[in-house]
Amino acid sequence: MPDNFSITKKIYYHDTDAGGIVYYANYLKFLEEARTEFCFHHGIDKTVLGRQDIFFVVAHIDVAYKAPARYLETIRVVTSLEKIGRVSVHFLQQVTRGDTLLVEAKVTWVCVNKELRPRPVPEEMKKLL
């Protein structure tokens, strides 16, 4: 993945099902956390953007679950920018444990105003990314 940014995360009991395996929907939270940190790393604070009537919503997500993570394991969530469109930002993300690929995802954000109407991705944000 080009221009990767990653975070690590320890799996806790509340992340898992009764069998000690990460509940599939929790990966969406892990991916969201990683995208947020990716933005912070690039100088983008979505709270500040919100004050300017600039919001990003997940419009599409394609997730492939390859292998499970388990209680007390440490995972790595890698995020990279695939492309920026006029009103969209496209990410590629992977969750790994060591050399094992656990999850692959493609995520599309759409830039909207407070009425949830599409608006152009700010030029300043494009420069930062």
Image (spheres, grey):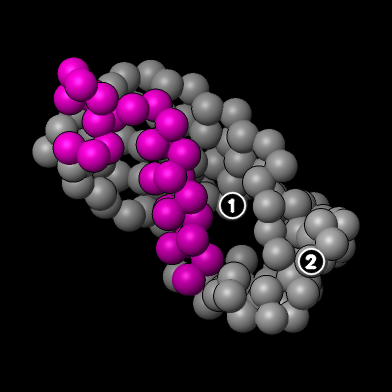
Q: Which residue is mark 2?
A: 114
Any magenta on residue 35? yes
Q: Amino acid at mark 2?
A: Lys
Q: What residue range appears in magenta? A: 13-40
Secondary structure under the numbered disc 2 in the rendered image: loop
Task: Please indicate, yes or no, whether residue 69 appears anywhere in the rendered image.
Answer: no
For the C terminus, the quadrant is bottom right
Secondary structure under the numbered disc 1 in the rendered image: strand
Q: Which residue is mark 1?
A: 81
Q: Amino acid at mark 1?
A: Leu
Examine the rendered structure and indicate whether residue 24 appears above or below residue 49.
above
Residue 23 has which mark? Answer: none
Quadrant of res 111: bottom right
* 111 left or right of 26 in image: right
- The residue lying at 31 percent from left, 19 percent from top is 67
Callout 1 environment at 10 Å: few (<14), some (14 to 19), or many (20+)? many
